[in-house]
Amino acid sequence: MPDTASRALDTFPRLLFYHAQVRGNRVAMREKDLGIWQSWTWGDVAEHVRALACGLAALGFKRGDNLAIIGDNRPRLYMMMTAVQCLGGVPVPLYQDAVGAEMLFVLQDAGVRFALAEDQEQVDKLLEIKEQLPALEHIVYDDPRGMRHYNQPFLHDIEELMAMGRIHNQNHPDFLDSEVEQGQADDVSVMLYTSGTTGKPKGVCQTHHAFISSARGGCEFDKLTDGEDILSYLPMAWVGDHLFSFAQAHVAGFTINCPESGDTVMTDLREIGPTYYFAPPRVFENLLTQVMIRMEDAGAIKQKMFHFFMDVARRCGAEILDGKSVALGDRLLYALGSLLVYGPLKNVLGMSRIRVAYTAGAAIGPDLFRFYRSIGINLKQLYGQTETCAYVCLQPDGQIKLDSVGMPAPGVEVKIADNGEILVKGPMLLKGYYQRPDATAESINADGYFMTGDAGFFDDDGHLKIIDRAKDVGKLANGAMFAPNYIENKLKFFPHIKEAVCFGHDRDKVCAFINIDVGAVGNWAERRGIAYSGYADLAGKNEVYDLIQECVEKINTELVQEGMLADSQVHRFLVLHKELDPDDDELTRTRKVRRGFISEKYAVLIEALYGGKASQYIETEVKFEDGRRGKVAADLQIRDARTIPVVKAAAGRKAA
């Protein structure tokens, strides 16, 4: 084991072997398998990484090679990342729910020679496209179930790879230490592909220095220690997971916990009781939806108690969390609410032990944000991109604003360009896009600032407020600002609305597509004796339209008070006959709306909204998980929503 305690801990392999020296018997990783939690200490992880790295070397892996990692969050997939880095290679995690054809571009673009697949499902995807991947020489798999009759010579069980590596290490005991010694802080440590919202994904090359600087800054900012527990369940290909589960764990030495499957995340969350938690707004929205569904099924007394104490929480909970002064009566009521409602609710959510929770990846609605803070969960927002290691702004404790993403993180410079675009500079910036010097040059200006593509402004307290993607911020025909993402997030706060897409640029009014949440609306319908045969049937019910119209009109009453966005009230809407789906290219794998694609695909519906029609027939092609294609047809009704006249004097406020 290299003596890392005496030299700079400037690469992830050096950090790993350092932890193995100073806290070798502490748990580094856990995984739930067959209902039982399995543990690996830092010493165990270091031994596994050594075996994996030497095994790869025995297979011919060389410095500079790229290795694809495909699968759910698994300890040995994380270990393989560090093993690759030990040899001077670059791990390239892919989204595990992508089909083979979607993976093809990334695997070809990265020139991948080696791949680690979690299980038979992921191996099959690679085999399906292998003929189009002449560079791919070896596929290693983690889970042997179902692999008994796969006899291709390029397939390797990870246990066999480690056994090979241990023999290699015995025969060449100084080999790996020498390889780790050659590693430099400025070496590329990981390649994360962008979601491809506006075109082909780009490989973002980030260095050890960039991610370690970001992780250290975050750990110091939130006083994270080696005693933290975090649930690692978000896609390994997402920058947020790489920062929180991989980089910060290597810097602070805390424990990451991998759930048994995507279906058991909530159960596993309750069992682990993490102290530190990270999730995109979508997860927090879904959790709140589940809470509201359960409350609808509760008895009348429980419902009244819940709503009474939630009113108390909304009134003073966030202020109590921030340590601000609150009237004694409210403070006593809140303490009683903690005993009867908030405490049990946090326990059900698996959030009883959380000291710090973060959300990022998309804007979170202020109402949703306030709900979690009001029940005592220290939920904060961070702001960043794949190109900035998800590290640009953080919210300091006690200075939380519901409508901001906080202040520039330690070591980060942020400024606003003349056109309102947010520009950032710091050690967390990408080294470059893989084999795309043109794209790299376009993303960083002459002064060395990365151009985020987001529009925003600083308020009087120095907090950054995001309006929308700069390219998405437009103007209505009357010149008023139109920020679609802002309106969509307000709509998605309602548990009955899963997704929303708003239109209005260069038009005289705002119109919207709505996706209902089939779980929440289905439960609502069943309680009212409304029969339905599936999503399309439920979405088309008059009663459901009435329900959604109430939500839209409530948002309009809020928007009219929001100054420069007062003209963005939703005038007309329809409920889509199908869910927007990444498999149909309507959303990215991180569930961001592909706005341009949707505008083209559903152009006939947009024309109907703005043409004053009361209904519109449409046929839509859909892809099934097994690769088959089909069509969904419906005659969609279109509703007018009540809007409130805008008093122009109230809309004169300007952004700083």
Image (spheres, grey):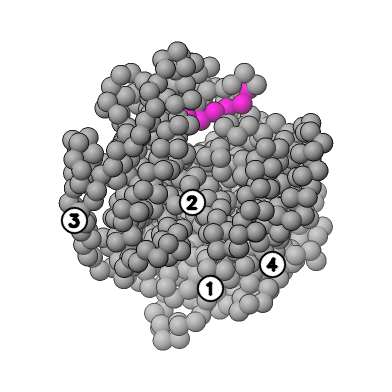
User: Residue at point 22% right, 65% down?
Assistant: 630
Q: Secondary structure at mark 2?
A: loop
Disc on the earlier residue, 3 or 2: 2
Instruction: Specify the amino acid type for callout 4.
Output: Glu
Per the picture, the main secondary structure of the magenta-coloured stretch is strand
Q: Is residue 440 left or right of residue 183?
A: left
Q: Secondary structure under badge 1?
A: loop
Q: Residues within 10 Å of mark 4 (few under 14, many from 20)?
A: few
Q: Which mark is residue 142?
A: 1
> Where's residue 349, x and y in %?
64, 58
Under tag 3, what secondary structure? strand
**Residue 115 placement (x, y as % from top left):** 46, 65
Of the 4 image quadrants, the one containing the N terminus is bottom right
Extreme-bottom residue of the structure: 149
Residue 82 in sight here: no
Sequence-wise, the earlier of marks 3 and 4 is 4
Q: Which residues are magenta?
A: 462-468
Question: Looking at numbered disc 3 in the image, what kind of residue is underneath it?
Answer: Glu
Q: Position of residue 157 (x, y in %)?
A: 51, 77
Observer-side mark, 1 or 2, equals: 2
Q: Nearer the viewer, residue 628 or 54?
A: 628
